[in-house]
């Protein structure tokens, strides 16, 4: 599971996933014919050298997704690219936060 907290404050230094604003499951995908579940299942029959390479591919694919969770604009872009995420967290709340931040900047 991936989660991101959009607010600052030391009241949640180590937030639990359910306390975060953005929550989603890591996307299920296939890399070189292997599903992510099979790659990450250490009891599967994948050769360990191959598994290491496949895990590196998962990391390479994941970094751009995680980087988009660093800002509201990035999250909006991520939701645009992956509309299936819209049912995980109310997208309107993110747009509302951006609108309110823009209004505060003009005051």
Image: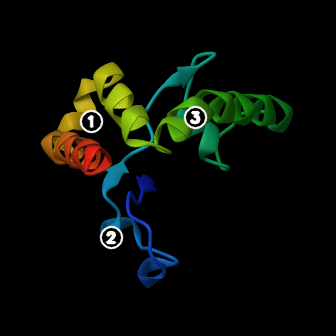
Residue 85's x, y, as percent? 27, 35
Determine crowd level at label 1: few under 14, some 14-19, many 20+ residues with C-alpha closer than 10 A. some
Instruction: Judge by depth and name the residue closer to the eye, 22 or 10.
Output: 10
Residue 72's x, y, as percent? 37, 41
Say whether marks 3 and 2 touch (CB < 8 Å): no
- The structure residue drawn at horizontal position 20% and vertical position 39%, both measured from the top left corner, is 95
Determine crowd level at label 2: few under 14, some 14-19, many 20+ residues with C-alpha closer than 10 A. few
- Indicate the secondary structure of the residue bearing disc 3: helix
Instruction: Judge by depth and name the residue closer to the eye, 74 or 47.
Output: 74
- Indicate the secondary structure of the residue bearing disc 1: helix
Residue 74 at least partly seen: yes
Residue 1 at least partly seen: no
- The structure residue drawn at horizontal position 44% and vertical position 67%, both measured from the top left corner, is 8
- In the displayed orientation, state which residue is furthest to the top: 32
Q: Earlier in the sequence, mark 3 or mark 2?
A: 2
Q: Which residue is mark 3?
A: 62
Label at residue 19: 2
The Cα atoms of the two marked residues, 3 and 2, are separated by 22 Å
Q: Which residue is mark 1?
A: 85
Q: Relative to 9, is 2 above or below?
A: above
Q: Give the quadrant of residue 74.
A: top left
Q: Relative to 69, is 32 above or below?
A: above
The Cα atoms of the two marked residues, 2 and 1, are separated by 17 Å
Say whether marks 1 and 3 touch (CB < 8 Å): no
Q: Earlier in the sequence, mark 1 or mark 3?
A: 3
């Amino acid at each position: 599971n991936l989660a991101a907290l959009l607010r600052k404050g030391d009241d949640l230094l180590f937030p639990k996933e359910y306390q975060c604003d953005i929550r989603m499951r890591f996307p299920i995908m296939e890399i070189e014919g292997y599903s992510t579940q099979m790659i990450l299942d250490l009891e599967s029959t994948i050769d360990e050298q191959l598994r290491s390479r496949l895990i590196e591919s998962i990391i390479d694919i994941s970094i751009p997704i995680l980087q988009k969770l660093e800002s509201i604009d990035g999250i909006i872009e991520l939701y645009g690219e992956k509309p299936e995420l819209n049912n995980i967290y109310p997208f309107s709340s993110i747009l509302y936060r951006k609108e309110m931040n823009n209004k505060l900047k003009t005051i």
